Image (spheres, rainbow, N blue to C red):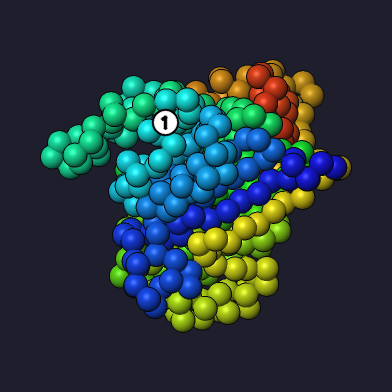
Amino acid sequence: MDNQRNLRIKFWGVRGSIPTPTQENLGYGGNTTCLEVRCGEQVLIIDAGTGVRNLGASLLREVAGSPLNLSFLFTHFHWDHIQGLPFFGPLYIPSNKISFHAAGGGPARLQEILGGQMSAPYFPVSFEFLTARQHFEEAPKSGFRCGDCSVYPFPLNHPQGAHGYRIEVDGQVFVHASDFEPGDPVLDQVLREFARNADLLVIDSQYTPEEYVTKRGWGHGTWLESTSIARECNVGQLVLFHHDPSHDDRFLDQIVENARAHFENTTAAREGLEIEIPAKRVPAAPLSGGGAARPGKPTMTRGEFAGRIRGDRALRRRFVADPEAILSEFGVGGGLSDTNPDGVNDGTAMTGQLLCTTY
């Protein structure tokens, strides 16, 4: 298969909360969060922390004056995920086309948020000076296409909300889940459904279990929880991400060593790390088994079921525990592995999509 169809992920910023450009952190890196995802000519950028500045400079050197067509996927809008955007060089070139995607709020709100950090008195250059052609788009819950990639957003438990992304192409599956704190039963299950059978899982692992005792409610997870999710979800490779500002290189080395005792194929994200997922001739395993409505039961559409479960907390808990049984009980047609009406499901779990809809 053409190597250009391989999914390639490169880390440009791996730190959470605030940049930490100090000597003891430079092995893993001090820039805040930014990932580059490539498939063929398509370039996706997940978040725009301070690492995005170096990514922009690299892209401009690569194309040497040719126009760029780029797509941003934002997990949320806390400063460490957007603070590098004003320094992203391709935004200042009129021939470039740059699309911004985020789940929830709509295009106008997305533009307002990104422009807000560049307004007076916070920044000397306003958003209107960014001359690239810009498009602001909602990331629909049902998924959408970016070039050859199918992209599926899903909600994460984090103060003011956040979204992860499952990206699929040619049987390759990459899942990005940051920022995320465990403890919400519904959203914990959503994450597991979207992470299932991923070749690569990049996940918020900011704290040690000991640190988490005093950081509960701050919106981040632990390396130990990340290894549990990787095991449960049959993940191929686990990358610990969103490193705490206080964790220097030696500390992160120790975290990786501890994590590998629980999930062997674990590493910690570091700036410059590149991971390639080869394209597969056989599609990725489905996220959940198929299931048809029980014979003799009246069929309920997904929309009808979503409306029913939305106002019934007890039913949501039962659905989290055994989605197949509940769908069969209510006669929801298609089962868990059915595609959505737009035909872009590509194996994404109906379970996760319904939970996203009803949460």
Name the residue tied to disc 1. 93
> How many C-alpha atoms fall within 10 Å of the one at disc 1: few (<14), some, or many (≥20)?
some
Q: Where is residue 199 drawn, in percent x and y? A: 70, 53
Residue 330 appears left or right of 119: right
Q: Where is residue 64 drawn, in percent x and y? A: 55, 39
Q: Where is residue 328 drawn, in percent x and y? A: 70, 32
- Under circle 1, the secondary element is loop
Question: 145 and 346: which one is in front?
Answer: 145
Residue at 48 percent across and 38 percent down: it is: 73
The amino acid type, in three-letter code, at marker 1 is: Ile
Above or below for 134 versus 91: above
Residue 236 appears left or right of 144: right
Residue at 29 percent across and 29 percent down: it is: 129
Above or below for 340 versus 186: above
Q: Is residue 323 visible?
A: no
Q: Where is residue 294 drawn, in percent x and y? A: 76, 28
Query: Which quadrant of the figure contains the N terminus?
Result: top right
Residue at 54 percent across and 67 percent down: it is: 268
Furthest residue to the front? Answer: 64
Residue at 34 percent across and 72 percent down: it is: 22
Q: Is residue 72 visible?
A: yes
Question: 12 and 176: which one is in front?
Answer: 12
